[in-house]
Amino acid sequence: MTRGGRIKDRETGPDRRCIASGEVRPAEGLIRFVVGPEAQIVPDIAGKLPGRGIWVTASRAAIEKATGKNLFARAAKAKVSVPADLADQVESLLADRVINLVSLARKSGLAVAGYEKVKDLLQKEEAEVLIQAEDGSQRGKSKLSTPHYGTYIGWLAASELGRAFGRDKVIHAALGAGGLTNRVVEDARRLKGMRAMGVAQDAAAGAAGKDKRAS
């Protein structure tokens, strides 16, 4: 903390300051950007690229505000180029990351797909996360409920979820407890902020009584 009680904008510690809102928030809810070798702004989804981080809340509105108001240059204290489709890049990278993590969870025996397998895992109370394709049948999806104190993810397309399981499409999937599951949930929350469909779908599912959600 500084003498004025303000949190320093630094690379150590769990919190970061969003350049769009000025708010200090946990790092897992933000996207890190760095200035690339050609003075371009580059998304660092994994948080491992070298250089001083520039942090923006994981939402399309925040990234578009930072882009439109030239906030990246102000934060970098230098002239930088910002791709016009930066928000789309972040969404695509986050989706790929979530899909890859679910795939790793599958290979580790933590993830299952298919209505019957998911139903069985839920009934055994071994599921921590219920994932359902946002473009799947609402009637079919309503037959499965989010695990007690668990998490619901519903903003991946059936084709995206299918990639995680080596199939064309997957509507229902579930994850058991484990470190990979925690990482899926964390990155899925960030992806939700980049997708308007995630917000709309989450509200609809909540109205149907599924109130244990990633938010």
Image: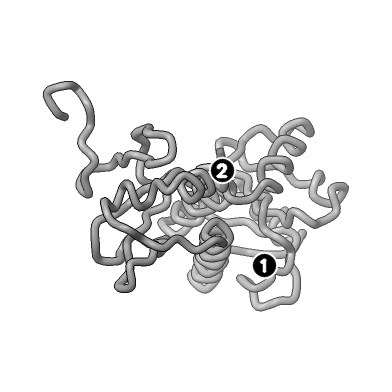
Quarter holding residue 48: bottom left
Image quarter (top left, top right, bottom left or bottom right) of the C terminus = top right
Question: From the viewer's perspective, is residue 107 above or below residue 72?
Answer: below
Left or right side of 53 for 42 = right
Left or right placement of residue 5 versus residue 86 in this view: left
Q: Position of residue 90 (x, y in %)?
A: 51, 60
Q: Earlier in the sequence, mark 1 or mark 2?
A: 2
Label 2 secondary element: helix
Crowding near the residue tagged with mark 2, few <14, some 14–19, many ≥20 C-alpha atoms within 10 Å = some
Kindly identify which residue carries mark 1.
Answer: 160
The residue beneath circle 2 is 61
Q: Is residue 102 visible?
A: no
Mark 1 against mark 2, which lies toward the viewer?
A: 2
Q: Residue 54's spot in the image, x, y percent?
A: 33, 51
Q: Residue at x 26, y 51 (%)?
A: 77
Mark sitting on residue 117: none
Horizontal side, residue 148 vs residue 203: left or right:
left
